[in-house]
Amino acid sequence: HISVRDTVYVGLYPASGGDVSISGGVTFDTSQLTLTCISTGGPATTVTWTRDSTTVTQGTQTVLNDPVTAQYTHTLTVTTGGVYTCTVANNKPSSGSASTIIAVGLTVSATPSSSTSLTISWTLEDSLTATSYTISYSNTNTDCFTDSRSGISASGTSYTLTGLEEGTEYSITVTATLTGNGGTQEGSTTATTLTAAPSAPPTDVVVRVESSTSITVQWGPVECRHQNGEITGYWVRYGEEGSSEEGRSVQMVSGDSSGGMTTVSGLTKETVYTVQVAAVTSGGTGVYSDPLTIQTPDDVFLSLNGAVIPNNGLLNISDIGSTDNTALLCITNR
């Protein structure tokens, strides 16, 4: 027949010891808002979590690795800040406990103060206090340039960052060093400085003759660090050589940061013109390019085949080609 005896689980707990302890302290997963502590030397028959000395709902207990090591992980999902303590105990004389300070919901915001400054504000949960704050920042688009800094000391609940780039988006992180065991909590946000007028002219400005009364103007982008915001258009300024800036005409051209092209019509034939281009943002009109001069021809139109007029307005014979085999080219240096 069958005889029933005591059941023995071999290898479930270490053969020696049995006193429990906590190794590594309590860790906090900010993405999952979960606390974790690891106990060694089980079985941990009692697992208790407290917040500010008040017992809270016990977390789940799962085997971390081979049970022969009697190492367990204890987790707790949290929704509010405070001093959390994990305590494990069994029927052995010793027990283990570890605690950490957790701030849930350190909120950070930022608003532009000017084209080169941002004001940062933050709020720490009422149940927590901080001994100090540090701020770090970096521009979000680093394809063109990098503007970053870390370890800025701050106190109170706000701080103004200065010396930033115009019209630039920044990622900002505030780190609070909390009282007690020196735990930390971070909060982040993004903000953009106010737009300013571009601080450099468009690049690669080129002027070509279209007819005796019109020219084509083409240009490339403003260097990205000097755009100072979103480019919304361009001003093309032109006038007869020797005229004052106030006496010259301007033509608005829609465009973006990539550059643009336009045709200026209604000019006087056989006249030397000065042409400049400037980019525009919501912050104003930027710097104009260096003047380029070009002379409109007379009514005997020359086929230029796309030749680029140099800065001095003169073309070499090699720059010009005929449109057919019988065309006669006449070049007049005026």
Image (cartoon, helix red, strand yellow):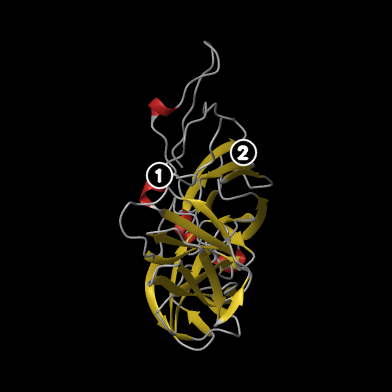
Q: Residue furthest top?
A: 325
Residue 96 lies left or right of residue 1; in this view the side is left
Instruction: Confirm whether residue 123 shows in the render.
Output: no
**Who is closer to the viewer here, 114 or 8?**
8
Tell me: residue 288, above or below residue 254: below
What residue is rendered at 42% in x and 40% in y? Answer: 314
The 10 Å Cα crowd at callout 1, few under 14, some 14 to 19, many 20 or more, is few
Image quadrant occupied by the N terminus: top right
**Residue type (three-letter) at the residue carrying disc 1:** Asp
Residue 177, quarter of the rendered image? bottom left
**Who is closer to the viewer here, 192 or 297?**
192
**Who is closer to the viewer here, 90 or 269?**
90
Question: SS for tag 1?
Answer: loop
Instruction: Confirm whether residue 304 shows in the render.
Output: yes
* Badge nearest the viewer, 2 or 1: 1
* Image location of residue 324, percent across then percent down: 55, 13
Q: Which residue position holds label 1?
A: 66
Mark sitting earlier along the chain (2/1)? 1
* Image location of residue 268, percent across then percent down: 63, 47
Q: Which residue position holds label 2?
A: 212
What residue is rendered at 55% in x and 29% in y? Answer: 302
Mark 2–mark 1 Cα distance, whole angstroms, equals: 90 Å
What residue is rendered at 56% in x and 38% in y? Answer: 209
* Image location of residue 5, percent across then percent down: 50, 43
Q: How many numbered dots are placed on residues in this image?
A: 2
**Residue type (three-letter) at the residue carrying disc 2:** Ser
Asked whether the residues under the numbered discs 2 and 1 touch, taking CB atoms below 8 Å apart as contact, a structural biologist would say no
